[in-house]
Amino acid sequence: MEQRLRDEVGVYEPLRDARRDILRGFSPRGAQKELTKSGRGMVAVMAPTGSGKTEAALLRHEKDPERLLFFLPTVATTNAIMRRIQAIYQKTNNIATLAHGLASLEDFYQTGLETGEVGSDVAGGCDQSAGGLHPSDFTKAGSGRLLSPITVGTVDQGLMTALPMKWTHLRLLALANAHIVLDEVHTLDAYQTRLLGTVLAWLGRVGARVTLLSATLPSKQLDELVAAYEGAGRGLKPSFPSVVEFPSSRQNTTSDIAPQVSDLEARKYVIDYDLSIRDASEGWAGSIGEHIRWVTEMRTRYPRARMGVFVNTIQRAQEISVALREAGERVLALHSLMTAGHRATVAEQLDEELGVGSCEEGICLVGTQAIEASLDIDLDLATTDLAPAPSLVQRAGRVWRRADEGRTERIDLPNLPLHIVGSLAPAWELPYPRAVMRRTETWLRDHRQISCPADIQGFIEAAWVPLENAVTEDELDYAAEQIQAEMKAQVETWSFEEMEAYTNYLRLHVLTSRDNLNPEKVSTRLIERTSYSFILCDPNGYGIPGALPDSAAATMEELRHSRSHDLIRTVLRAGLNTSSRRVISAALTHGVYIEGDEFPALLRGRYLVNVEHPLDYDRLAGLRVMGDTKR
């Protein structure tokens, strides 16, 4: 039985030389030095993008080797970190899991897609004699994914632990016996932060190690998480409230001991930004035109520059990318209205052309939040929509990310340049809250530069809108929405106080046997708009990247009679999710719903859609609705 557990579940095998394998010959930086000295408890690391926080967390992990659960905000960031962890642990022989709804598309999983629930990852075994990270059948799906010695997944996999679901007790025990790393914690909204608080209450109770990583963490959010881990309870402040010094690390053990706060070394630089707020009379066209004008001007001035355009909506990204292509610019675009296969291809291309070691020149990247914190790319210049302070800091983190000897030959600027475009047009600030956008804009108007890291925390705090500081009607409305989100999370989570009443933790299964247990009504995200999953078909041979070559009807018939691993993998690569009402309305007219036991479980609940008028798929800009240009 012991050997079977080793083969099917796995026992963590630590690195033989952690410093060598993790740092690859480089000297440890500030956060990396500090975390090698940390002990048990929860450590929060607040440091700039590109400062080696991931490696710092792994160095802390190897100080006291145990199972590792590494959670990230998006599928893209999860895949990227998994590849880095695979490279670091290639000389070990560890069972590992990649945990998110599209994990089966990744090279880490090659076989075993014939079963499993929608949204789960299913993979077959692997030749363990080859060494390195490999999947196993026992930990391939559902809650079992958290049992692997190494699990890299989206944050949703950890937040499920706060909800009364079928295997909550297994998730609680899996997290209790591991080192939990949560990256980009600032991306969690009020609802998710409250769910995480419930999870941290449990982790603090059992003494699990937790590492929080962020470049832009507001002190109020950190206080809530610290209070949860210390056991102070919902809505209470920690014993020692946070005054975040950026960059720094903060280690909490118990509520009786003051946290150990350490300043961290960080590269110092200045962001020279200019703020262009377009008049309401120009509508959306004004902001779109300003981005295009800026790129054109910069290309004339710096023909070899690597430029980026960050926008807040997919439609703006599509319009800008097409306009720049027509103007002769060499453009790459990335957003969520692309098939999974198309996105993967673009991500690989970006890694080759703008990633580590790349010397590519004269290229322009256009994208949404999908490139904000998910890709390790390095740009020379960037223009961005006005966005909340944390997002702007993240976007600036894609510019001058690494030391590049060739940069001075491409541009001749003393400081990091950032062009920021806003608008007074109605509802322009969507999808972000108006109150947050206005506070961010006010701070930017009052300053001329952002000194990094000195100004970062002040910038983040100035854009935070707590109820006690809400003044305007927009701010009061926003604060009320946050309170409602927190209350909803509190209602949906299991009661930690109720669980504490059970002296025998073997009875944790009581959390999954409630009379009102309904997994379909609980969620790790507060979804305001319904999202649909579409699988694109290209029966007319337009050459749509990632799409299926046959019609929806023909593909449906093939799926009735085949559960081929390769077929299911191909079908999933043709998929995309969207909450866009325009796209949903147009797609459903050509959609065929997949349901019934005769179809693979992984595909049920999705729509097969023929890309026909009014739908159009541009090989650069992705899926569009023809004749629907919002200005």
Image (tube, rainbow, N blue to C red):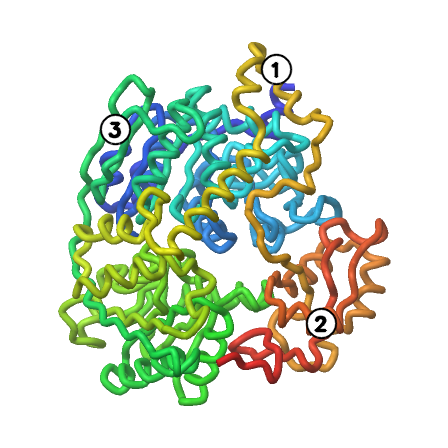
- Label 2 and label 1: CA atoms lie apart by 49 Å
314 vs 380, nearest the viewer = 314
Q: Which residue is mark 3?
A: 37
User: What percent of the width, then of the height, locates residue 594?
Assistant: 78, 58
- Secondary structure of the residue carrying tag 2 is strand
Crowding near the residue tagged with mark 3, few <14, some 14–19, many ≥20 C-alpha atoms within 10 Å? few
Q: Which residue is mark 1?
A: 506
Q: Say what amino acid the circle numbered 3 marks.
A: Lys
| Discs 2, 1 touching: Cβ within 8 Å | no
Q: In this rendering, is residue 107 above or below 256? A: below
Residue at far top of view: 503
Closer to us: mark 1 or mark 3? 1
Q: Secondary structure at mark 3?
A: loop
Please state which amino acid type lies under the numbered disc 2: Cys
Q: Can residue 349 be seen in the rendering of this structure?
A: no
Mark toward the start of the polypeptide (3 vs 2): 3
Three-letter amino acid code of the residue under disc 1: Leu
Residue 603 in the image, given as x and y percentages of width and height: 73, 55
Q: Is residue 148 above or below residue 119?
A: above
Q: Does residue 211 appear to the left or right of 115 in the view shown?
A: left
Label 1 element class:
helix
Q: CA distance from mark 1 to mark 3?
A: 34 Å
Asked if residue 477 shows in the view, the reply is: yes
Specify which label sits upstream in the sequence, 1 or 3: 3
Left or right of 11: which side holds 18? left
What residue sits 29% from the left and 83% below the top?
299
Q: Quadrant of the N terminus?
A: top right
Which dot marks residue 537?
2
